[in-house]
Image: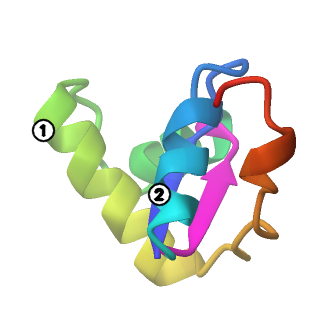
Amino acid sequence: MVVLEGTGGYEIAAVEALQAVKLAVAVVNPRQVRDFARASGKLAKTDALDAKVLAWFGATMRPAPLPPVDVSKSAIW
């Protein structure tokens, strides 16, 4: 399972590429992840820490994967 934060649409190409190689993908609310980090005492904001917190959030909260995207109908491909 790959967990991504929603970024206002910038995540769409990544979701499609990951699903094209048959990986399960969940897109989560960035505020929920930040609140999760804050509740665990992780207040620093770096890319490395964000990645660890996002992985921890995914393992703990187990978000539902998105249904597969039909790449043939996508505007990205």
Residue at image location 65% in from the left, 33% down from the top: 12
Q: Give x and y (percent) for residue 29.
A: 69, 42
Instruction: Report which quarter residue 2 is drawn in.
Output: bottom left
Q: Looking at the image, is 20 positioned above or below residue 30?
A: below
Q: Nearer the viewer, residue 52 or 77?
A: 77
Identified at 73% across, 49% down, the residue is 71
Estimate the spatial distance between the alpha carbons at disc 2 and disc 1, rounded to whole Å: 21 Å
Judge from the rendering whether residue 74 lies leftward or rightward of residue 44; answer left or right: right
Q: Dot 2 corresponds to which residue?
A: 18
Find out whether residue 17 is within the magenta segment: no
**Magenta span:** 23-30
Whole-percent x and y of residue 6? Answer: 65, 34
**In the rendered structure, which amino acid carries the disc numbered 1?**
Ala
- Toward the right, the furthest residue is 73
Callout in the foreground (2, 1) = 2
Query: What crowding class fits label 2: few (fewer than 14 Cα within 10 Å), some (14-19), or many (20 or more)?
Result: some
Q: Is residue 28 magenta?
A: yes
Q: Percent x, y for residue 7?
A: 62, 23
Residue placed most toward the observer, 75 or 52: 75
Quadrant where the image shows the C terminus? top right
Is 45 situated left or right of 68 in this image?
Answer: left
Question: Based on the displayed image, in which of its 4 quarters is residue 35 positioned?
Answer: top right
